[in-house]
Image (cartoon, rainbow, N blue to C red):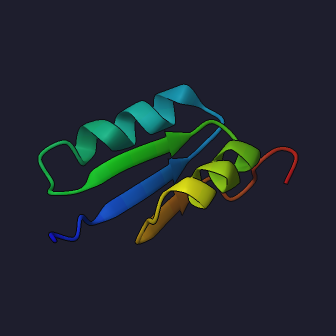
Amino acid sequence: MEQVNSILLVDDEKNVITSLRRSLFDEPYRISSARDGEEGLELLKKERVKVIISDEHMPGM
């Protein structure tokens, strides 16, 4: 079974997530994203990720 390297992007600004996705487009990663901390935590319950890139000042967290 092949293990997929995955990254979770968490940011409340859509343009930041879009920019990060664009910069990682040609890389061999599965990219997931969340618009806030709660959504990111819910996603982590379902998926295994190796790296999380997150906004430092996440509203509500």
Image vertical order of residue 22 relative to residue 54, above or below = above
Nearer to the camera, 9 or 5: 5
Q: Quadrant of the N terminus?
A: bottom left
Q: Is 18 drawn above or below residue 38 in the view shown?
A: above
On screen, residue 42 above or below 48: above
In which image quadrant can residue 6 be found? bottom left
Residue lying at 50% horizontally and 63% vertically, measured from the top left: 52
Residue at 15% x, 69% y: name it. 2
The one of 26 and 4 positioned closer to us in this rendering: 4
Relative side of 12 to 58, left or right: left
Q: In this rendering, is residue 16 above or below 7?
A: above
* Percent coordinates x, y for residue 7 in the rendering: 39, 58
Q: Is residue 5 left or right of residue 33?
A: left
Classify residue 13 as left or right of residue 48.
right
Closer-to-camera residue (11/43)? 43
Quarter the C terminus occupies: bottom right
Residue 19 position, x and y percent, is 37, 36
Indicate left or right for 49 with 60 as reference.
left
The quarter of the displayed image where residue 32 is located: top left
